[in-house]
């Protein structure tokens, strides 16, 4: 299985940040959204999602907005937003370079 | 709920792939895991029809005995059920739903999670071994430098030392194996390879692993029994003061002193019995540095060493002249008396006489439980007769 590292973000991490562009979300919403968006190409397991959310929260990319029972809702921070945009720009550049090469 | 049963876990705690494969394979035999415990030895299963049940281990955080609510929420939403925390290290989830996604869909992130576990294992490995070997070194230093009798089980012969050495080595190897398991798993994930979760184990392999597990448990228990039996002996016999021959009491030397008791500590060390005498020093008696430096002042409390119940006088009068070094004091061809007065025992207010005897006599002088010392006198008498014949 090839690695899917995108600089500091893996593919799963990229999609989680992308999901937060739609607003505040809880873990299950994120998982469902990514599954639908990618037409089940990317399915986030609960362990992976929990790890990503913990990591993002520690690094200040997202912040918790509500705790309702066991359900936690998060939103993206300006730092997370800028990191996502940097990553997106980098990816676009990669694709543009490939197009220039005739792909 | 159907009938339940317990299965002995044939793998060690950190063999994540083996454990996941084995726990999942139980369902093929009609055993659905329903509970794992903080002790990683047993798993509780429910008997049912053979089916497919996947079991996965999620590394627990530091000091995390139960999974966080947020983690449970995500797992349950994805169709997984929490069944316990295995060995306080892995939150264990199972699913009967074949459509439930794998908990760790991203191998890179999974490798990071396992990396934390690896660090924890390495930390525990270093800490436990440092503590253990530090303690062992201390015991050896104490034993060979001060000849502390409580720890003299190490002097008790080749086989016992070998036994302890094997136990230590076994414990070390088990820990090393666990460390290698988790490192190898992490290495596999780092290479981007998926975990090996569909392994099949032969009955022989599982049986052998279970026997090994039981053996390790039994040896560990025996180690603790051995350790505590050697250190915390309870078969101390008190010899009445009037049974002891004219031991000049400290009170005769120092009017304010209280008489001390005489204790005979049983020993299974094959070739010596230790006699400990407590000296109760009156508060008005000042222990000075010069007393410590000059052992002779203390020696006078115990200058006649004998056991009247045996009707054997073991030592002649010990005077500074006869024992200038405080070492080997008296010999009768068979017995060797050593009189120790170390700063440690001195400070504790205790004087000890170790009576070492030759192997030939060992069988007779060996102290057993609370037996009357007079039986040893009879045994010696019998031996004397045989020898004279």
Image (spheres, rainbow, N blue to C red):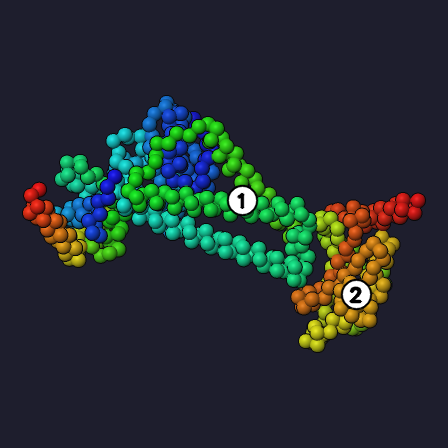
Residue B205 location in percent, x, y?
A: 47, 31
At 60% from the left and 47% from the top, the residue drawn is B164
Residue B116 location in percent, x, y?
A: 35, 50
At 43% from the left and 42% from the top, the residue drawn is B13
Quarter-wise, where is residue B45 in the image?
top left
Q: Give the mark, 1 or 2, whose residue is nearer the N terminus.
A: 1
Q: Residues within 10 Å of mark 2 (few under 14, many from 20)?
A: many
Q: Are marks 1 and 2 on the same chain?
A: yes
Residue B182 location in percent, x, y?
A: 39, 44
Mark 1 falls on what kind of element?
A: helix
Q: Which mark is residue B194?
A: none
For label 2, the residue is: B302
Using the image as rendered, state which of residue B40 and residue B284 is in the foreground. Answer: B40
At 72% from the left and 69% from the top, the residue drawn is B281
Mark 2 falls on what kind of element?
A: helix
Residue B237 against residue B349 in the figure, above or below: above
Q: Is there any visible trace of residue B59 in the rendered image?
A: yes
Using the image as rendered, state which of residue B360 and residue A24 is in the foreground. Answer: B360
Residue A41 location in percent, x, y?
A: 18, 37
Q: Which mark is residue B170?
A: 1
Chain identifier of the residue bearing label 1 in the image = B
Chain identifier of the residue bearing label 2 in the image = B
């Amino acid at each position: 299985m090839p690695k899917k590292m995108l600089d500091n973000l893996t593919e799963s991490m990229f999609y989680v940040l992308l999901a937060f562009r739609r607003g505040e979300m809880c873990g299950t919403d994120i998982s469902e959204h990514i599954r639908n968006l990618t037409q089940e190409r990317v399915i986030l397991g609960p362990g992976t999602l929990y790890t990503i959310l913990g990591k993002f929260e520690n690094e200040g990319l997202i912040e918790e907005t509500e705790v309702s029972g066991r359900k936690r809702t998060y939103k993206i921070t300006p730092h997370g937003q800028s990191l996502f945009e940097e990553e997106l720009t980098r990816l676009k550049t990669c694709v543009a370079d490939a197009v220039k090469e005739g792909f | 709920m159907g009938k339940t049963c317990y299965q002995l876990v044939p793998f060690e705690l950190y063999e994540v792939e083996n454990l996941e494969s084995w726990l999942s394979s139980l369902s093929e035999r009609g055993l659905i895991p329903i509970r794992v415990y903080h002790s990683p030895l047993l798993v509780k299963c429910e008997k049912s029809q053979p089916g497919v049940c996947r079991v996965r281990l999620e590394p627990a955080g530091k000091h995390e005995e139960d999974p966080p609510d947020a983690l449970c929420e995500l797992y349950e939403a994805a169709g997984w059920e929490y069944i316990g925390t295995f060995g306080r290290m892995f939150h264990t989830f199972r699913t009967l739903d074949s459509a439930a996604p794998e908990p760790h869909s991203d191998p890179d992130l999974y490798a990071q999670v396992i990396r934390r576990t690896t660090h924890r294992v390495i930390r525990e490995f270093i800490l436990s071994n440092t503590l253990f070997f530090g303690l062992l070194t201390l015991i050896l230093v104490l034993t060979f430098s001060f000849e502390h009798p409580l720890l003299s089980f190490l002097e008790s012969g080749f086989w016992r030392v070998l036994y302890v050495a094997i136990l230590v080595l076994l414990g070390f190897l088990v820990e090393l194996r666990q460390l290698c398991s988790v490192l190898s798993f992490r290495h596999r994930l780092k290479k981007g390879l998926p975990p090996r979760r569909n392994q099949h184990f032969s009955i022989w392999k599982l049986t052998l692993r279970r026997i090994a597990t039981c053996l390790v448990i039994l040896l560990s228990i025996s180690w603790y029994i051995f350790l505590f039996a050697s250190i915390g002996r309870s078969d101390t016999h008190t010899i009445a003061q009037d049974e002891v021959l004219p031991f000049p009491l400290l009170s005769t030397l120092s009017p304010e002193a209280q008489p001390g008791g005489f204790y005979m500590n049983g020993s299974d060390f094959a070739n010596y019995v230790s006699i400990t005498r407590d000296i109760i020093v009156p508060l008005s008696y000042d222990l000075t540095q010069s007393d410590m430096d000059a052992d002779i002042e203390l020696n006078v409390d115990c200058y006649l060493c004998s056991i009247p119940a045996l009707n054997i006088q073991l030592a002649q009068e010990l005077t500074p002249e006869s024992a200038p070094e405080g070492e080997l004091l008296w010999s009768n061809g068979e017995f060797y008396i050593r009189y120790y007065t170390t700063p440690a025992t001195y400070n504790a207010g205790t004087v000890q006489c170790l009576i070492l005897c030759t192997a030939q006599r060992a069988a007779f002088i060996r102290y057993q439980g609370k037996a009357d010392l007079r039986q040893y006198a009879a045994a010696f008498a019998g031996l004397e007769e045989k020898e004279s014949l």
